[in-house]
């Protein structure tokens, strides 16, 4: 079987063997048009299953979606919820995108992924070897965050746990503590902790004190020590709808699927002629019947549907599903500036040590729509992210703080008038707190024809973020296809355990 990237150790997980004779007569509702729902819909429709995708927003893509807006100068633009990195070890997400473009021509590589601390320390990922452990060794050798004196203080036994990651075993060992606790136990240099670990942990939209140490260890394995795909990533050349989701929706329709946006699902109940009745459009909405349902919503959407659907699954499962925790609020601020930022500024910069600023993107470096606006006006399109804000925070106050921090990081922006701006304060990402793994719902439910998908769903593979969403979507499709005697889809992951057997063995001896 051909590996999907350049890592020969990438792990293939074949679909389970079909049960019984093939039957594609079933009708399935996929609730949610984000990455997970799109993957589930593709997996089903490509096997001939009658699939209806229901998305409450007017656009597809979920948290990677986008919608049109008109700037003050009359220019049409696309707003979104912010930058996303398409890493090359996102095998299943990239397989989904290949449905629309086999060559992934909609993506373009960013040449570097620099990280900068407020005190001046900085790290870069360009030019590193792709394969571990040489990538980690080269990173540490050239990083100002690692000195021999500080490295001598590292707790070797604790640090080796990062080299002995297996899924789900790492959750059994580390899920009871938080990410900051793990970093303290390892005694990594403080600057390296801020740059290399906390920047990554905050990509889960949570303070390290609210994040399971097992999630952090798994993430380190996925992006650093477990994969030979390298640390750089790709980004879409155009705004998300044009580059990704409109072509994928066309693929789904070509497979016979129905794609309905602006269609909110309110309730799932037992059906009459078919197994489920799905109600859309509020209390006066319509019921439509299906043989199976994929709930591929965000955590808030899952909570709302489950609370209004007392007739599905069982009480214990509904309680677990309705209690999924959400991450703190985050803010995306996009600014159209009358002057350009300095030419040396990268397309993406991860930041740490600031009151709330987590990264800065300069969109015209890679996105055609922003490049056209910048070329016509002589300005720049800049995006700022703030993760893990305080509950109940004020949007205006927070975006003013972000702008002040941008002026500190990129001083030339202080003289640039903001000619237009858009801000998105949201709180709909999942949280993976210490001790939460055991209660995390899996793809399967007590009802074999009701399945879950999403980045909040338990997947016993080393995947995270967008890749977990795509993987869970294909696994949800596979679970249903198997019931109907239809072939499923192979999914892939980075190796499911550390790549260096002697160090894994040493880590286990030291744990005893």
Image: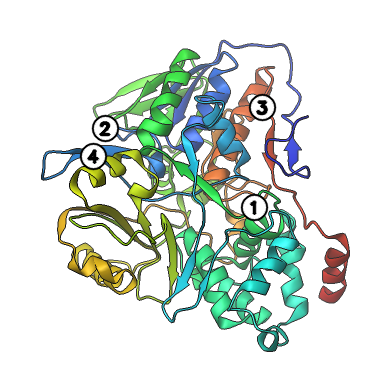
Tag nearer the camera, 3 or 4: 4
The CA span between labels 1 and 2 is 47 Å
Q: Earlier in the sequence, mark 1 or mark 2?
A: 1
Residue 253, x across and y down, in percent: 44, 16
Kindly indicate whether the residue at mark 3 contacts the one at mark 1 (C-beta within 8 angstroms): no
**Disc 4 from disc 1: Cα separation:** 33 Å
Examine the rendered structure and indicate whether residue 202 appears above or below residue 376.
below
According to the picture, the residue beneath numbered tag 4 turns out to be 77
Quarter occupied by the N terminus: top right
| Residue where numbered disc 2 is placed | 282
Q: Earlier in the sequence, mark 4 or mark 1?
A: 4
Q: Which mark is residue 116?
A: none
- 101 to the left or right of 131: left
* SS at circle 3: loop
Residue 502 in sight here: yes
Q: Residues within 10 Å of mark 2 (few under 14, many from 20)?
A: few
Q: How much space separates mark 1 and mark 3, taking CA atoms?
A: 26 Å
Question: Is the residue 497 above or below the residue 367 in the image?
Answer: below
Q: Residues within 10 Å of mark 4 (few under 14, many from 20)?
A: some
Mark in front: 1 vs 2: 1
Task: Quickly name the residue at label 3.
Answer: 489
Quadrant containing the C terminus in the rendered view: bottom right
Note whether 229 is above or below 502 in the view shown: above
Corner quadrant of residue 349 = bottom left
Residue 341 in picture, x, y percent from top left: 29, 60
Q: CA distance from mark 4 to mark 2?
A: 31 Å
- Mark 1 lies on a secondary structure that is loop
Q: From the image, tell me which residue sits under label 1.
A: 230
Residue 270 seen anywhere in this rendered image of the structure: no
């Amino acid at each position: 079987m051909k590996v999907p990237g350049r890592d020969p150790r990438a792990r293939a997980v074949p679909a389970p063997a079909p049960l019984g004779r093939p039957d594609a007569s079933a009708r399935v509702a996929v609730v949610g048009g984000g990455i997970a729902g799109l993957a589930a819909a593709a997996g089903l429709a490509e096997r001939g299953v009658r699939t209806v995708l229901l998305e409450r927003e007017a656009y597809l893509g979920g948290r990677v979606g986008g919608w049109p807006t008109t700037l003050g100068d009359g220019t049409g633009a696309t707003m979104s919820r912010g930058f996303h990195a398409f890493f090359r070890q996102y095998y299943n997400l990239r397989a989904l995108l290949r449905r629309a473009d086999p060559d992934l021509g909609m993506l373009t590589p960013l040449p570097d992924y620099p990280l900068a601390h407020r005190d001046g320390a900085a790290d870069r990922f360009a030019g590193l070897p792709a394969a571990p452990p040489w990538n980690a060794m080269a990173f540490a050798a050239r990083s100002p965050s690692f000195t021999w004196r500080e490295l001598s203080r590292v707790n070797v036994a604790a640090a080796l746990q990062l080299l002995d990651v297996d899924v789900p075993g790492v959750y059994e060992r580390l899920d009871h503590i938080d990410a900051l606790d793990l970093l303290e136990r390892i005694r990594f240099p403080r600057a390296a902790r801020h740059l290399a670990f906390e920047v990554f942990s905050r990509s889960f939209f949570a303070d390290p004190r609210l994040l399971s140490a097992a999630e952090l260890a798994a993430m380190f394995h996925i992006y650093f020590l477990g994969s030979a795909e390298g640390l750089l990533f790709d980004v879409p050349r155009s705004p998300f709808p044009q580059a990704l989701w409109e072509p994928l929706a066309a693929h789904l329709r070509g497979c016979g699927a129905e794609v309905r946006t602006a269609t909110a699902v309110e309730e799932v109940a037992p059906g009459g002629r078919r197994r489920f009745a799905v109600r859309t459009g509020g209390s006066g909405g319509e019921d439509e019947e299906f043989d199976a349902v994929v709930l591929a919503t965000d955590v808030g959407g899952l909570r709302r549907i489950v609370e209004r659907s007392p007739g599905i699954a069982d009480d214990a499962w509904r309680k677990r599903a309705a209690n999924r925790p959400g991450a703190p609020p985050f803010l995306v601020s996009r600014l159209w500036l009358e002057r350009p930022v300095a030419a040396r500024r990268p397309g993406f910069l991860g930041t740490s040590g600031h009151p709330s600023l987590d990264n800065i993107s300069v969109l015209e470096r890679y996105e055609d729509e922003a490049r056209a606006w910048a070329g016509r006006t002589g300005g720049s399109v800049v995006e700022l992210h703030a993760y893990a804000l305080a509950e109940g925070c004020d949007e205006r106050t927070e975006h003013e703080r972000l702008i002040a921090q941008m002026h500190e990081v990129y001083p030339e922006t202080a003289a640039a008038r903001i000619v237009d701006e858009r801000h998105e304060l949201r709180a709909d990402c999942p949280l993976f707190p210490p001790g939460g793994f055991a209660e995390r719902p899996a793809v399967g439910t007590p009802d074999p024809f009701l399945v879950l998908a999403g980045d909040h769903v338990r997947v016993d593979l080393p995947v995270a973020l967008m890749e977990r969403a795509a993987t869970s979507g294909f696994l949800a499709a596979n679970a249903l296809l198997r019931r109907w005697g239809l072939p499923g889809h192979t999914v892939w992951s980075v190796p499911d355990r550390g790549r260096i057997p002697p160090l894994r063995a040493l880590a286990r001896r030291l744990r005893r």
